[in-house]
Image: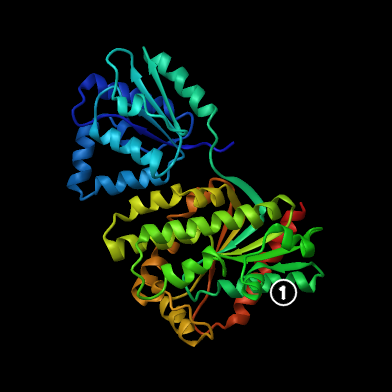
């Protein structure tokens, strides 16, 4: 069973020693359920530790946004009024969109903005003692659904523009054809028909088994808005508009096509997905508009369509890696021209750093995804990518039989 990442929020700045010691005991208790992201609250002297972090140049806001982005649920003690805790609760509920348990010690009522706030992700309860609080926490954690179920028949290819992910997807599709497996190409259907396919369209070809090839953003309907307006060079649309566009496109795509295909046992090969948005949009928000990258990262993980896709955790993720200069040369020489604002060298260099850092991977690996970084060196042509793809895919396909 997946152990959640827990964000424990409690007042620090104006808290007395009793309050801080109580918070430390709660944080210690929470460790048995999963990883407590707010490690500061378990320190012997949290105020001294925080002062030391600031002296080292740690941006506390960025750090805390990062912890929230990686958290699966929040437990917040709202007994003592705190602007910081209130802000964290608001972000968790309305931006990151994770379940929140707000607790307060019986006595003076806490802020009515939380205690009387109706929200499907919020549960608010009072406690009298630490033992009482432990029972409340135990019930909450053990009865809260954590997003993300492993789907071994879903594979995702992702990486910087020009990395060769398209070669990987097409190679696996050609493998399926050679092995007499029916293949439905959703992208080609969209291009040919001007609409995105539904499962009713696809199952005429693969209803009794086979492979679905699909890409994000789609090539019709909401996907066309994303491609032709939101991410074109010269676009004036904000990172928020772009993120919502991607989110809506993938929500419809998963509801109408990918989810029923996965449930029917179809092998689904997805070229880009919500993983891409977790990399690209935080960089976009920081580079183009001055946002804190981690705050946008948390927002991305909270958008409805993104969470819908994230509940389908891929069994295999292939991340082809290539030098940015080589990728840029490939983009200049390929036949199609997306004219996308993200294809500039400076942007792609930042994106490449995120992919290689492993920043996104922990969320998937904790849920069982196998992640393979496929290196590509200068002078290696597509035939090398094909060879490596087939080796990876054959090994993975054999593992599915077991």
* Left or right, 291 with reference to 177: left
Q: Quick one: 302 or 255, which is closer to the camera?
A: 255
Residue 334 visible (yes or no): yes
Residue 278 seen in the current view: no
Look at the picture and state if 355 lies above or below 235: above
- Compare residues 70 and 222 and report the one nearer the observer: 222
In the shown orientation, is residue 318 left or right of residue 292? right
Q: Position of residue 69 (x, y in %)?
A: 40, 46
Quarter of the figure with residue 183: bottom right
Q: Which residue is mark 1?
A: 174
Q: Position of residue 111 (x, y in %)?
A: 28, 25
Question: Would you call the spot at circle 1 few (<14 residues within 10 Å), some (14-19), or many (20 or more)?
Answer: some
Under circle 1, the secondary element is helix
- Specify whether 339 is left or right of 154: left
- Residue at 20% x, 31% y is 13
User: Where residue 373 sits: x, y (%)?
Assistant: 53, 64
Residue 239 vs residue 168: left or right? left
Residue at 29% x, 54% y is: 292
> What colour scheme governs how the chains and residues are painted in the rendered image of this protein?
rainbow
Above or below — where is 194 with respect to 360? below
Which corner quadrant holds the N terminus? top right
- Residue 364: give x, y in percent of width and height: 53, 50
| Residue in the image at 32% along x and 38% along y | 88
Badge count: 1
């Amino acid at each position: 069973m997946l152990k959640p990442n827990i964000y424990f929020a409690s007042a620090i700045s104006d808290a007395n020693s009793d309050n801080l010691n109580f918070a430390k005991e709660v944080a210690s208790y929470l460790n048995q359920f999963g990883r407590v992201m707010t490690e500061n609250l378990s320190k012997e002297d949290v105020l001294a530790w925080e002062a030391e972090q600031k002296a080292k140049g740690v941006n506390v806001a960025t750090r805390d946004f990062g912890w929230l982005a990686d958290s699966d649920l929040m437990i917040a003690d709202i007994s003592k009024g705190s602007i910081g805790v209130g802000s964290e609760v608001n972000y968790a509920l309305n931006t990151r969109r994770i379940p929140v348990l707000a607790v307060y010690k019986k006595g003076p009522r806490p802020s009515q903005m939380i205690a009387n706030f109706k929200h499907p992700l919020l549960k608010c309860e009072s406690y009298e003692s630490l033992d009482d609080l432990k029972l409340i926490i135990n019930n909450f954690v053990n009865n809260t659904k954590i997003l993300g179920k492993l789907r071994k028949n879903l594979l995702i290819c992702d990486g910087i523009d020009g990395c060769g992910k398209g070669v990987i997807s097409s190679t696996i599709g050609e493998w399926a054809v050679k092995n007499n497996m029916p293949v439905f190409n959703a992208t080609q259907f969209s291009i040919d028909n001007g609409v995105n396919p539904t499962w009713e369209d696809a199952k005429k070809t693969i209803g009794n088994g086979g492979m679905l090839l699909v890409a994000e953003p789609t090539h019709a309907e909401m996907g066309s808005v994303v491609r032709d307006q939101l991410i074109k060079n010269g676009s004036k649309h904000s990172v928020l508009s772009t993120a919502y566009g991607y989110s809506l496109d993938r929500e419809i795509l998963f509801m109408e096509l990918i989810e029923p295909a996965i449930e029917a046992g179809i092998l689904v090969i997805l070229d880009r997905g919500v993983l891409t948005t977790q990399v690209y949009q935080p960089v976009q928000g920081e580079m183009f508009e001055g946002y804190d990258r981690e705050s946008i990262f948390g927002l991305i993980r909270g958008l409805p369509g993104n969470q819908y896709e994230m509940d389908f955790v891929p069994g295999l993720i292939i991340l082809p890696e290539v030098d940015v200069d080589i990728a840029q040369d490939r983009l200049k020489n390929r036949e199609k021209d997306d004219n996308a604002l993200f294809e500039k060298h400076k942007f792609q260099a930042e994106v490449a750093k995120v992919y290689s850092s492993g920043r996104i991977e922990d969320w998937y690996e904790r849920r069982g995804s196998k992640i393979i970084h496929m290196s590509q060196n200068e002078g290696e042509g597509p035939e090398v990518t094909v060879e490596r793809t087939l080796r990876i895919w054959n090994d993975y396909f054999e593992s599915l039989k077991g």
